[in-house]
Image (cartoon, rainbow, N blue to C red):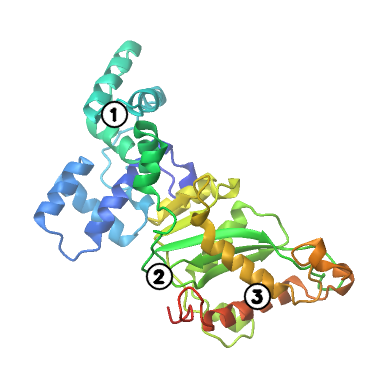
Amino acid sequence: MVDRSDINAVDDAAWEQAVAREAVIRRLASKASPNRAEFLKACRDLGLKRSRLYELISAYKTRPVASSLLAAQVGTPTGSRRLHDEIERVISGAIEDFYKSLQKPSINALQKEVRRRCSKRGLRPPCWTTLRDRVAAIDPAELTAVREGAKASRQRHHPVPGSYQVERAYEVVQIDHTLVDVIVVDRVHRKPLQRPWLTLAIDVASRMVAGFYLTLEPPSALSVALAIQHLVQPKFNWLESLGIDADWPAEGLPETIHVDNAKEFRSKAMKRGAEEHGISLQYRPIGAPHYGGHIERLIGTMMGAVHLLPGSTFSSIKDRGDYDSVGKSAMTLDELERWLALEITRYHAERHRALGIPPVAA
């Protein structure tokens, strides 16, 4: 039985199959009545009977996340089992050292190779659709890189400087962390503590701040998750709890999240959490600074404003001079969070140099 209460506990093969199905079924579920040709093509692509596909579409409409399409969710025959671990190892090995090659073998050729390896070990080979689903779950950029080279992968799957165009709000959201250039104090005695960490998210199309999370802890999978929760949720009640009367119309699931290669962005929980909701998680290629340019400029803008606060450490020792950052510190973490919220809503209303209009208008 697949445990859907914790998607991280689902085995890789079952999860990859669900993700491959979600990309196809999401399009069908969004239409009141998909045309016959499109429906039959989906049956062929997913290797499903029509009745089974109808069941999966119904399950997805009820709960539109990838885990609703896990193999055991709908119509699994009694007594059915996942592939044996040894067969899974054969498939993974054949994909890694046979399919991911410059010879670019087909899935039919992969099936023959898997059959050969299974026969050698006395194992029952998997069906063609199983192999197709495993291949469909491979990152296209990664597959192109190993079969055609890194240059071809960059040209095909990554925008180049000067052509990075995003048109829709929440089409692409960038997330990154920074150590805030100010020292905060504790709530009780107002004694200096440390510099806090800020996780910021920006909507690339509108330059709206999509969300943020402020903490005394170093960046982690938890701080990333809480920042994503903030960018997804409506901001009205949160602003009201801070006593702020302002509009911050940024909410919803982003289509793509761009992050750097830090370990907290590469956790299994982060990857599967994105896939569960149909979000594409993309990592900044090495040597491609344009990928993170928007979030880095936003961080620079926010830190420039922070330098006016009491307890600022400024951006360098030279800039700080004789200023006593520790002695002048005065704001608690909660007070800094409220100040950031006010500063962000002010930033939203000011004309953005690159856009020519305020982010809130964009």
In 3D space, how far apart are the residues under numbered discs 2 and 3 (Cα atoms)? Answer: 22 Å
Disc 2 marks which residue? 169
Q: Nearer the viewer, residue 144 or 226?
A: 144
Q: Amino acid at mark 2?
A: Ala
N-term mark: 2 or 3? 2
* Residue shown at the point (50%, 60%) measured from the top left: 174
Front-most of residues 275 and 147: 147
Q: For the N terminus, give its image quadrant.
A: top left
Neighbor class of circle 3 (other Cα within 10 Å; few <14, some 14-19, many 20+) is: some
Numbered label attached to residue 345: none
Q: Is residue 72 visible in this depiction of the protein? A: no
Q: Nearer the viewer, residue 122 or 316?
A: 316
Which mark, by number, is residue 104? 1
Tag 1: amino acid: Lys
Check the image and report above or below for 10 versus 192: above
Q: CA distance from mark 3 to mark 1?
A: 51 Å
Judged left or right of residue 351, residue 68 is left
